[in-house]
Amino acid sequence: MQTYDFIIVGSGSAGSVLADKLSASGRFSVLVLEAGGTDRRFYVQMPLGYGKTFFDPAVNWNYKAEPDPGLGGNADHWPRGKLLGGSSSINAMVWIRGAREDFDDWRAAGNPGWGYDDLLPAFKALEDNEAGADTWRGVGGPLHVTDCSNTVHPLTKRYLAAGKQAGLPLNPDFNGAAQEGVGIYQISTRNGRRMSAARAFLRPAMKRANVRVETNALASRILFEGKRAVGVEYLQNGRTNTARAGREVILSAGSINSPQLLQLSGIGPSALLKGLGIPVVHASENVGANLQDHVGINYTFKGKLPTLNQILRPWWGKLLVGMQYILTRSGPLSLSMNHAGGFFRTDPAFSRPNMQLYFQAFSTVIPKGGERPILTPDPWPGFSIGLSNCRPSSRGEIMIRSRNPLDYPKIVANAYSTNADVDEMLAAVKFVRKIAAMPAMAEIIAEEVLPGPSIQSDADLITDFRKRSGTVYHPVSTCRMGPDPARAVVDPRLKVHGIEGLRVIDASIFPDNITGNTNAASIVTGWKGAELVLEDHK
């Protein structure tokens, strides 16, 4: 059995940062266990290629949530990255940090060091923002952030104008002074290629002699001596291997796999573990509980002007944009599907936005089996205005079904299970229609395709968004951070309550969800977590 100073389970957004920062001095040996394989795949590196990875079992766990009454009984598809870089290798690349108040709430809940002013230096240090440095943006860091202002589809300007006509300010930087308003999204790419956490952090770390990365290595159990974590058992190529950690085991497997591995290892709800015949190392009712996620829906329109549909659907258009991308690393394939978006409040009494907008200059009403039909859009000029809730009050859970690490856990999302979530989504979809009714958009809309003009009453709007909503892939809080072991899984230094030598450092530790896409906050969690680890091992 080989011994390393640190074993990191998972090479995703946080794990890649940890591997880089913990190995940088050369003092510590680091083993990274990744259940998936390489990220060196064309459709991973090409930004719009994530339509192809959306169901691809070679790079995607392809989880499925339980049938959800809140979603009209639908069983939601939950993609999660199963490769180097984790979900940062298959996500939509929108670079949003979250609102100042989100992180200040974390700190106020008893987590010193996690407020916005505490984390801003880390955000700036890890970024290389093409828009340039200012009070909020950083340059020169390992992760490049692309300014898409000059490359988005021309229809984006009409969306921004309509947002202003509907009463929202134009916001040049959602990661700047404030989030509210409409604007163009910054994305995590560089020179037309995806800037995953693997590319920014893990690949440089892999060049060091003190870093070892094992792919296709599924962590199956944490090994303990008493209440101290001392190693990890993992499955690879049909064999069971073990590795020992001289200093710490760190779980960075994400909001699904981190609680799953804790439960498989005897840390979790005692009744669940005993019922499955798993010896209880430490009873913790919060492992896998408190699941929070953002839920979204698209309103789709048939336009009077060309959209990306006209270039991405025909074979000659695919050839054209493909050649453009291969030769110049530019064009539609170098961008996210979300060219613009925004944040708004459904109630002016709220202190900060509670809804996020997305503008997509194409439409995919007609589905294609086996892939997210980004690269095969509708045969007519279409576009979508989407939205998702930012801080829903609904809570779900993720619990193992058996002792077998190969069995997928049970994901219960409980979407729209509170009246508050239903009420705010009802107000939000009405606001989407308000944007579409503004002169800048109305004059180029031929018709509303989804849900369509027949859906007008509150009851019909609610039925529609329950039926058509789904996750926007931001699950958090299943190993949440907090000072009280009765309410949290890890303490403010990300150490698992009641256990020595074990931390969780990924989005599962978020005390509450943030206002916006979760990838940037997951990466800064890895950065901050690495600083905490290094402070404890001087």
Image: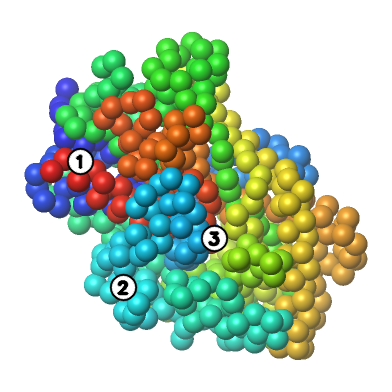
Q: Quadrant of residue 236?
A: top left
3D distance between C-alphas at marks 3 and 2? 20 Å
Is 269 above or below relative to 428?
above
Quadrant the C terminus occupies? top left
Q: Position of residue 49 (x, y in %)?
A: 47, 62
SS label for mark 2: loop
Q: Position of residue 4 (x, y in %)?
A: 16, 33
Side of 469 where 132 appears, left or right: left
Camera-near label (1 vs 3) is 1
Please report the residue visible at 59 percent of the width from the left and 66 percent of the height from the top.
352
3D distance between C-alphas at marks 1 and 3? 31 Å
Quadrant the N terminus occupies? top left
Is 301 above or below relative to 89?
below
What numbered label is drawn on residue 515?
Answer: 3
What numbered label is drawn on residue 536?
Answer: 1
SS label for mark 1: helix
Please report the residue visible at 73 percent of the width from the left and 59 percent of the height from the top.
424
Q: Nearer the viewer, residue 188 or 394?
A: 394
> Could you classify mark 3 by the number of other residues whose Cα lies within 10 Å: few (under 14), some (14-19), or many (20 or more)?
many
Q: Which residue is mark 2?
A: 138
Q: Is residue 448 visible?
A: yes
In the rendered structure, which amino acid carries the disc numbered 2?
Gly
**Sequence order check: which comes first, mark 3 or mark 2?**
2
SS label for mark 3: loop
**Sequence order check: which comes first, mark 1 or mark 3?**
3
Q: Position of residue 22 (x, y in %)?
A: 19, 47
